[in-house]
Image (cartoon, rainbow, N blue to C red):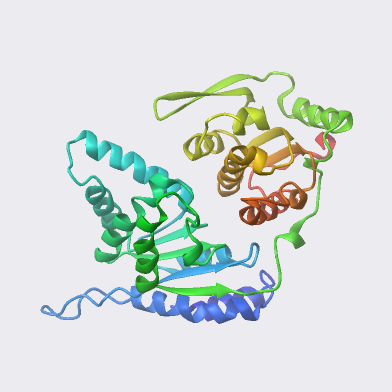
Amino acid sequence: MKTMPDIYADMVNSGELTADPAQEAILPEFERMRAALAEASPKGWFRKAPEPPKGLYMWGGVGRGKSMLMDMFAASLDVPNRRVHFHAFMQEIHAGIHAARQDGAQDAVAPVAAKVAEEVRLLAFDEMHISDITDAMIVGRLFQALFDAGVVVVTTSNRLPDDLYKNGLNRQLFLPFIDLLKERMVVRELTSPTDYRQGKIAGSQTYFTPINADARAKIEQVWQSLTHGAARPHTLTVQKRQVEIPAFHNGVARASFYHLCGRMLGAADYLALADAARVLVLEDIPLLSRQNFNEAKRFVTLIDALYEARVRLICSAAAAPEFLYVEGEGSFEFERTASRLREMQSEGWSESPDLKPDER
């Protein structure tokens, strides 16, 4: 069985990666977990199974390779594991809690955590970020149950644990969760000076700015080439609610920023859209600030869902990604979104078929 440093070295030697000392410094943490998880069940009839290793909370700037290292680690394991975006996981948890309450469970978190623990020995979360009070109020009990059941957790974040749910409502009730993370996970910062996503920008234009007649004409040209005028409204059913997409054809969706982010939609709606579409044409993304803070939060969640599902994004916006949200509450979190918007423009980024040359 190859160690994590071996796997990383192989990828560097093959040209898949460029050696990065900051990434290499994190590898021993992954290796200690990999070696511990590879331990067989109890040696001998009367010996207890070994204690699960501490997990890893890896935080740092956008584009530094956190998700890449986590994915490499998960792929190296022979034990049941799951890699999932934190937003998507919490949506599943809320659905499970609702079902448990319907069944009359007094503690609805317990059966949901038990089910997760039965299925995996390791959970790998991408982008732990907690801004929703309903998430904040249950993660403590949920993670305590998972840890007690022996589940090892690895997560990436662009915030250190002490800044999770910062300035959130009733944050004092959330603080024990931060202590739990520090107790059951090793906290490491990935300090690479390089944002690798920025280096991937190339290929056909998919991001049009500023919003003007020329941008609208180019968006329309791309839309017609993809749908040949055959698009119709499309309705998604999300948790017994109806979410209408204004135009949809053969996996290609089209909507305005206001339609998707100006209404009371959430992560579940965006995940359903990302599951249904392989391409999203999103028009008229405005400048973001404290004046449209709620719309900006929804936009961040939308981009997370599209990114995780590898949905190709074609959009028009008031400014380049780095200048969409430059000041006010939420601008720090938006750095990750701006980086993802840049990466999503790169040729070959999406696993969906690229536009043909005559359709660009």
Residue 174 figure quarter: bottom left
- The residue most toward the right is 214
Rendering coords of residue 45 (x, y %): 11, 78
Rendering coords of residue 201 (x, y %): 77, 55
Rendering coords of residue 104 (x, y %): 17, 37
Vertical side of 2 occupied by 254: above or below:
above
**Quadrant in which the C terminus is drawn:** top right
- Total tally of numbered discs in the picture: 0
Q: Residue at x 59, y 34 (%)?
A: 277
Rendering coords of residue 204 (x, y %): 81, 45
Relative to 168, 103 lies left or right: left
**Quadrant in which the N terminus is drawn:** bottom left
Q: Residue at x 73, y 19 (%)?
A: 229
Vertical side of 352 occupied by 259: above or below:
above
Vertical side of 88 occupied by 68: above or below:
below
Residue 47 figure quarter: bottom left
Residue 2 visible to the viewer: no
Vertical side of 22 occupied by 76: above or below:
above
Residue 181 visible to the viewer: yes
Q: Residue at x 18, y 41 (%)?
A: 105
Q: Nearer the viewer, residue 122 or 86?
A: 86
Relative to 159, 112 lies left or right: left
